[in-house]
């Protein structure tokens, strides 16, 4: 297992149970969770993006749709739904050094094959971290079961958990960084 994958797995173990602390997290709060996690991972040097899952996979068409909506300032959940996207769930996407792509949400770390097999869901749209942050800051279009008053608590928990994972894995990162600098 690579050093960076160990870090992501540690984050996974740190975040396990967060959906029990934050009520209805995956009923309208997955976008906020994904945005916060992606921002924190980016802070520690990870190149990540965000994906949405839905009933079909046409990423090229959906990227064009998102780019068009962004250029017209209409990158909203409602507009994406109106364009035929399912937007069932949002996850953070990360590819490790070996080329394996991982998808992270509040329930763990997944592969695309697992999502198709277990959830019958496909990656339908890929967004940048900043685009996801913009979407998650919008209140319109999200499932209202998630109480947005929990966002500060969620953000704080994610920040603490990602830092804890980084701190625990830190000596390995020093070795990894020194070795890769040689």
Image: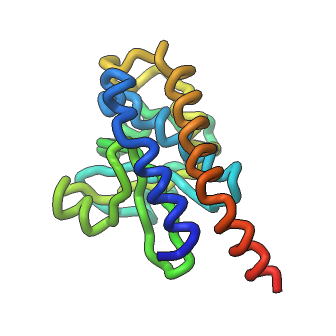
The residue under the point 30% across, 44% down is 86
Up the image or down, 166 lies above or below 182; here it is above
Viewer-proximal residue among 63 and 181: 181
Residue 155 shows in the view: yes
Q: Residue at x 17, y 63 (%)?
A: 117
Q: Can you give x and y, in whole percent of width and height, for residue 51 in the image?
A: 44, 53
Residue farthest right in this picture = 182
Please tell me which residue lies in front, 151 or 49. 151
Percent x, y of residue 23: 33, 21
Applied colour scheme: rainbow
Q: Nearer the viewer, residue 35 or 72?
A: 35
Circle count: 0
Asked which quadrant contains residue 70, the reply is top right
Seen in the picture, residue 62 relative to 156 is either above or below; the reply is: below
Q: Residue at x 29, y 50 (%)?
A: 54
Residue 30 spot, x, y in % from top left:
40, 36
Q: Is residue 67 above or below residue 33?
A: below
Identify the image quadrant of the C terminus.
Answer: bottom right
Looking at the image, residue 164 sits to the left or right of residue 107; the answer is right
Q: Residue at x 42, y 53 (%)?
A: 104
The x and y percentages for residue 84 are 32, 45
**Which of the two residues, 161 or 97, is positioned nearer the viewer here?**
161
Q: Is residue 109 above or below residue 178?
A: above
Residue 74 appears in the rendering: no
């Amino acid at each position: 297992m690579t050093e960076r994958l160990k870090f992501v797995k540690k984050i996974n173990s740190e975040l396990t149970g967060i959906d029990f602390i934050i009520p209805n997290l995956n009923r309208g709060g997955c976008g906020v969770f994904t945005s916060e996690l992606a921002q924190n991972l980016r802070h520690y040097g990870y190149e990540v993006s965000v994906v949405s899952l839905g009933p079909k996979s046409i990423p090229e068409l959906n990227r064009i749709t998102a780019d068009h909506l962004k250029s017209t300032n209409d990158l909203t959940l409602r507009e994406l739904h109106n364009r035929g996207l399912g937007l069932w769930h949002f996850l953070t996407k990360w590819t490790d050094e070996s080329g394996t792509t991982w998808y992270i949400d509040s329930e763990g770390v997944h592969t695309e094959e697992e999502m198709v097999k277990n959830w019958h869901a496909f990656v339908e749209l890929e967004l940048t971290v900043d685009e996801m942050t913009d979407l998650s800051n919008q209140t319109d279009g999200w499932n209202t079961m998630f109480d947005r008053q929990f966002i500060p608590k969620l953000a704080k928990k994610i920040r603490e958990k990602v830092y804890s994972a980084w701190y625990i894995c830190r000596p390995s990162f020093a070795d990894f960084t020194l070795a890769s600098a040689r």
